[in-house]
Structure formats: C-alpha cells, structure tokens
C-alpha cells in the first residue's frame, strides 16, 4: 500500500509537484494519468527515493520513505523512466545482479529467476547478452529485474513506452497477474486507452496538481462528458492551452 | 558488504567481457617492455660499433712504437689515404694522422716530435672519434715523457705537479637506478591506465547507458555501490601493474647490461619491493578516476577529464626533479611521488624501512577511500543522478 500526502517539489521557480495526495490500495491497479510534464515522473522519483521532496509525507507499507528510503525501496519493484541494460550481461545475469542487491538468498534467487524467465517469456533470451535485444526484450529484462525480489508494491513509469502491440499486450497481462496476486500496482501513462483498459482507479494529474480521481465511471460523471478522452481533456485543461 | 561483493563481481565480469577495458589493461603493459628491448639493444649496438674505430695513419712505418701502443688498446690502424686533406673534406674518413719523416729521429734525439692531425672542424659528429685518436697519442706521449725522465734518473712525479683523481661515489647499482628512472614512471602510468576504463565505464558509463537510475533504486547505500565499482577498477589496475612489471623484467633480462657498464640487479626481492611500493597506488588512481568520471555525462567526456588529470599527480615528481630534491620525509605520503621515491630506493639496493612502505601505501589507500566517499556523497544529489 502506498500513501502520499501534501507532496511538494520545486525546480527553481517551477512547482513541478504542487500538493499531491493519493492512496494506492493493495490488490488494485491505479493509473497516474497526465500530459507530458504534469509531474508524474517527479512524483514517482520522490516515491522511490531518488529525489527529495520539499514538503509532504510518503509511506510504503507503513514505512516512511524520507526516514527509511532503503526499507521502502526493498518493498517496491520499480521500472523507472530510464531502463538501460548492461550490454555485456545476459538477461539472467541482470536478474541475478539485482536480486543480489536486493539481498535475496542464493537458492531462493535462482528459483525466482527461473520463475520470471517463464512468466515473462524470456527463455529465448535468458542466456544471451543484452547487446542485440529488441525494445520489447529490453523492457522484459528491466521489468524482470524490478520484480526479482517479489515486491508487494510495483511502480511502473510509462511501462508501455516504445513497445509494439505484442509487447503492450504482454505488459497488460503481467499487470493483471500482479493485481490477481494482490499486489499494489501504480503506473503512470499519458495514454488514455491504456489507463482505461487496465485501471481500477485513475488519478489525473496536471501541472503538478491532482485534478480528479476515481473509477472511470466516476470521472465521466464528474466531467459531464461521454468519453474518457473528452473527460481527460476537460479535466486537465489542455483544451484551454491549445486554443 | 554483500552488496559490495555483488557489485565488484558484476563489474569484473562486465570488464573482462569489454574489449576496451581489456585492451587498456593488456596492451599498455606490453608496449613499454618492447620499447625497452628495442632501445637498449640499439644502445649496446652503438657502443659495440664505436669500439672498433679504425685509425688512418699516413707513414705508420715511421712510428712502430706508437702503432703497437694503439693496437694493444684494441684499435685497428689502417693505411692513410694518399691525399689526406681531400679524403677528410669529402668525408671518406673523419681524420687522418700524419707521421712526418723525421719522427723517429726527433724521438731519438729527445726532441718534441710532431704528428699532424687533419680534421674538418665543421663536422660535429666526428668529434668523438677524433677525441679518441687525440687522447691515444697524448697518452703515448706522456708515457714516452716518463720514460725519458726515468732514463735521466729523475722521478716522473717532478713533471706532474698536480693530478686530478675523480672519485665517483655512486655505486654501480645507484648508477643503474638512475638509468632506470623510467621504470617507476612506467609502472605509475600502468596503475593509472589499466583501471581507467573500468572507473569510467562503471560511473559515467552507467549514466550514458541510462542504467544508473534502475541501479540506484535498489536498497543499497551509495557508498557500497561505489566501493564495489572502485574495487573492480583497483583489481584491473593492480593486474595491469603486475603484468607490466613481469614483462619489464622479462624484457630487461634480454639486455646485456655488462656491455653497457651497468650492474643491474633485479632479483626476486627487488621485484617484490617494487610491487609492494606500486600496488597501493591503484587505490588512489582508481579512486580519483571514479570521482572525476562522476562529473562527466558520457564516456568520452570522462576520458577527456581523466587524461588531463593524469598530469596532476605527475606534477610533484616533475617539480622534485626540476629542483633536484633528494629523498625528503614529506614526499612519502604524496601519491605518485612517494611511490617514485620508494621504487628508486628499492632498485638502487638501499635498505627500505617498512615504515616508508606503510606511509606511502596507507596514504594512497586513505586518499582513494576519501575520493570514493566524496563520489558517494555526490551521487545522493539529484543533479548528479539525473544530470540536470
């Protein structure tokens, strides 16, 4: 479970995150939806401990991120915005390295790696070096290493970025599986269809503030529009800017 | 601790598979020794050549005593050209000695006999062989002079009120050490170059590959991560130094030092001493490189900074050489300079105290750790992590 309260972050004169509160419950998929530059990535970076917040409070499974960032990181599986691999390591070695950094015991780690290779359909690339991997194969490895310690909370920053149709479908299946396993899943996206197809709850963020949150139906009712896209445009106020 | 080992292991595997890293750790140690064999073999060759100088003499039959004197000193006397001046001018010979007809007569009458030396003053490179011919005749003349005095019952010392005796206090081994200044220099460079690629690849490289952010979200302290990365560069650096030393020793075994007039003793104790002196430098070299590379956004940028940085640690030794400073106590803890002083002592066969090893080694270790600690602090800053 993730709990965020009164989160603020400034870069110079720009308020990138300007008072964000939300909660992500276990066993649900929550989507952080917003246009580019809305503050999604900054919010996630503060949550996984790579950026300091100017003000506010963040908890992961009851652990205060500011006070015990490593404790919180151990309870999160994170697919960050940048997901570079080591070209000279194999897929399996990537998972093993991150498992060791997460402190997973040796015998348990090997079993978990086999499990992930199967679940993420990586058997063809498991023992190949990452050098020539396709975009889809890269994302699989990046996701695999994020989940190697079987975390309760999963943070995905624009997980389908750069994926083709097949890759996107595989990602969606993974996300649904994680929900079925009772995990707390938070992912960010700027693609309407993706969020509406997957999420139990949607949080719409714009210019560093939350402008609306709820289920898809609640958001439609709130905006008074018929489609989610219209609702999104109306709620974020992109509309006014483009005109 | 487990995390440090995990990072170290991963970076070593990664480095061993990287052609660039392996090249810098293997090629560099090989170039120096090859160069040395070539250089010294050329020097010995030259020295051998300069020894069999031919001395062209016109009228050799008029001075059998002098010819005998010259030939007994290992030189070859040849018949001088018919037209000495023309031969010297067109360069067939460097010089010609001409013995006049009344040479033997003058000697017999105890007069000063003259020998003509024809040379071309504009030809600078002939200086050495002319000097040798000149001094051969001079020494023959002195010997004859002494014999004349003795024949008249006078001590030859009367005719030589002052004599200068040169006392060279440098032992043969010290002279060799002086000759060997490039060995410490080369080993020091090896310490910097062999681990460089890893130091860059594991820091600036992570940023360039966009793998830094995923790495940093693991519950591991920045210090542990950087310790692992640093130690992997240290391992490569040490391996490079050891490899350099081994190939240097192998190369130097093939040089005939006796012919060069140098007694070089590079036995097991000296090699061990040099290794003990240099290896700790790897801690400092890699630490400083990790720190500098962390400021760079790309691999190339980091390499530029680091190649500039190699000059900085070299500065103290250059200054020490310019002011020809000896071995001062404050030199030991300065990286590079300390190692250089220590190695020179080892190679010249002076007894080196354990304290010197400890002071030099510990200082490099501590300074290396300090660099890593500062880098770890840097990596907690958002602008460093995200390269803003």
Image (spheres, rainbow, N blue to C red):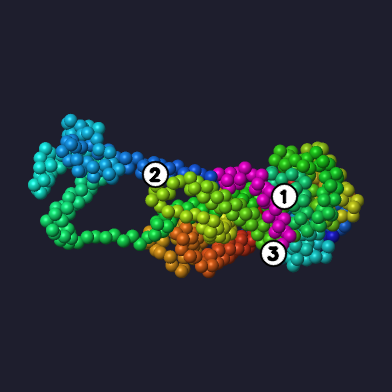
Among the two numbered marks 1 and 3 on one chain, the one whose residue lies closer to the N terminus: 3
Is B338 on the left-hand or right-hand side of A243?
left
Residue named by callout 1:
A81
- Label 3 residue SS: loop
Residue designated by label 2: B43
Q: Residue B168 appears at what percent x and percent y? A: 33, 60
CA gap between label 1 and label 3 equals 21 Å
Choose mark 2 or mark 3, whichever is in front: 2
Query: Label 2, label 3: how many angstroms apart (C-alpha)?
Result: 70 Å
Of the 4 image quadrants, the one containing the N terminus of chain B is: bottom right
Please tell me which residue is depicted at 78% across the width and 40% down the height of the picture.
Answer: A125
Q: Nearer the viewer, mark 1 or mark 2?
A: 2
Q: Is residue A243 above or below residue B312?
A: above
Is there CB contact under 8 Å for labels 1 and 3?
Answer: no
Q: Residues within 10 Å of mark 1 (few under 14, many from 20)?
A: some
Using the image as rendered, state which of residue B258 and residue B148 is in the foreground: B148
- Residues A235 and B90: in front is B90
Where disc 2 sits, the SS reads helix
Give the letter of the chain under mark 1. A
Q: In the image, is B235 to the left or to the right of A154?
A: left
Give neighbour class at mark 2: few <14, some 14-19, many 20+ (Cα, 10 Å). Answer: some
Other-residue count near label 3 (Cα within 10 Å), few / some / many at <14 / 14–19 / ≥20: few
Which numbered circle lies on residue A54? Answer: 3
Q: Which span is picked out in magenta?
A: B1-27
* Point 48% across, 60% down: residue: B346
* Rendered location of residue B204, percent (x, y): 61, 51
Q: Which of these two is toward me, B43 or B195?
A: B43
- Residue B314 picture location, percent across and down: 47, 56
A134 or B153: nearer the viewer: B153
Chain label for disc 3? A
Residue located 58% across and 46% down the image: B26
Q: Is residue A181 visible?
A: yes
């Amino acid at each position: 479970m993730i709990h965020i309260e009164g989160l603020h972050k400034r870069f110079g004169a720009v308020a990138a995150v300007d008072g964000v509160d939300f909660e992500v419950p276990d066993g649900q998929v929550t989507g952080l939806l917003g246009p580019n530059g809305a503050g999604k990535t900054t919010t996630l970076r503060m949550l996984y401990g790579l950026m300091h917040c100017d003000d506010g409070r963040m908890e992961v499974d009851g652990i205060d991120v500011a006070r015990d960032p490593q404790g919180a990181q151990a309870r999160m599986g994170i697919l960050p915005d940048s997901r570079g691999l080591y070209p000279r390591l194999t897929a399996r070695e990537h998972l093993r390295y991150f498992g060791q950094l997460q402190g997973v015991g040796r015998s348990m780690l090997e079993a978990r790696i086999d499990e992930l290779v199967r679940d993420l359909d990586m058997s063809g690339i498991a023992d190949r070096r990452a050098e020539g991997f396709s975009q889809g194969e890269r994302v699989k490895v990046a996701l695999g290493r994020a989940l190697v310690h079987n975390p309760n909370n999963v943070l995905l920053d624009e997980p389908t970025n750069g994926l083709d149709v097949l890759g996107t479908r595989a990602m969606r299946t993974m996300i649904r599986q994680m929900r079925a396993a009772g995990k707390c899943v938070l992912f960010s996206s700027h693609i309407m269809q993706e969020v509406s197809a997957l999420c139990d709850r949607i949080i719409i963020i714009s210019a560093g503030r939350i402008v609306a949150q709820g289920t898809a139906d609640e958001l439609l009712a709130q905006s008074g529009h018929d489609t989610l896209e219209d609702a999104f445009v109306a709620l974020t106020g992109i509309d006014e800017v483009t005109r | 601790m487990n995390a440090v080992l995990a990072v170290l292991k991963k970076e070593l595997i990664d480095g061993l598979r990287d052609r660039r890293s392996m090249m810098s750790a293997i090629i560099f140690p090989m170039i120096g020794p090859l160069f040395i064999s070539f250089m010294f073999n050329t020097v010995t060759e030259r020295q051998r050549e300069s020894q069999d100088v031919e001395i062209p003499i016109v009228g050799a039959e008029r001075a059998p005593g002098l010819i005998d004197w010259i030939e007994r000193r290992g030189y070859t006397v040849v018949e001088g050209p018919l037209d000495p001046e023309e031969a010297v001018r067109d360069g067939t010979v460097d010089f010609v000695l001409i013995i006049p007809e009344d040479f033997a007569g003058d000697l017999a009458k105890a007069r000063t006999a003259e020998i003509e030396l024809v040379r071309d003053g504009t030809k600078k490179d002939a200086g050495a062989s002319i000097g040798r011919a000149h001094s051969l005749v001079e020494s023959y003349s002195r010997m004859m002079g002494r014999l004349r005095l003795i024949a008249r019952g006078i001590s030859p010392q009367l005719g030589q009120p002052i004599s200068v005796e040169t006392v060279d206090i440098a032992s043969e081994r010290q002279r060799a050490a002086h000759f060997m200044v490039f060995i410490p220099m080369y080993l020091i460079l090896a310490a910097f170059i062999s681990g460089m690629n890893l130091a860059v690849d594991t820091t600036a490289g992570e940023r360039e590959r966009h793998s830094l952010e995923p790495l940093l979200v693991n519950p591991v302290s920045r210090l542990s991560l950087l310790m692992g990365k640093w130690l992997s560069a240290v391992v490569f650096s040490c391996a490079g130094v050891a490899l350099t030393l081994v190939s240097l020793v192998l190369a130097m075994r093939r040089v005939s030092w006796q012919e060069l007039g140098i007694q070089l003793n590079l036995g097991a104790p000296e090699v061990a001493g040099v290794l003990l002196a240099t290896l700790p430098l790897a801690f400092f070299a890699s630490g400083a490189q990790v720190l500098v590379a962390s400021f760079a956004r790309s691999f190339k940028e980091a390499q530029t900074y680091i190649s500039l940085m190699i000059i900085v640690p070299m500065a103290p030794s250059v200054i020490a050489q310019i002011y020809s400073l000896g071995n001062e106590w404050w030199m030991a803890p300065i990286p590079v300079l300390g190692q250089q002083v220590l190695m020179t002592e080892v190679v010249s066969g002076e007894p080196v105290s354990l304290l010197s090893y400890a002071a030099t080694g510990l200082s490099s270790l501590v300074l290396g750790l300090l660099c890593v600690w500062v880098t770890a602090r840097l990596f907690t800053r958002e602008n460093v992590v995200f390269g803003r």
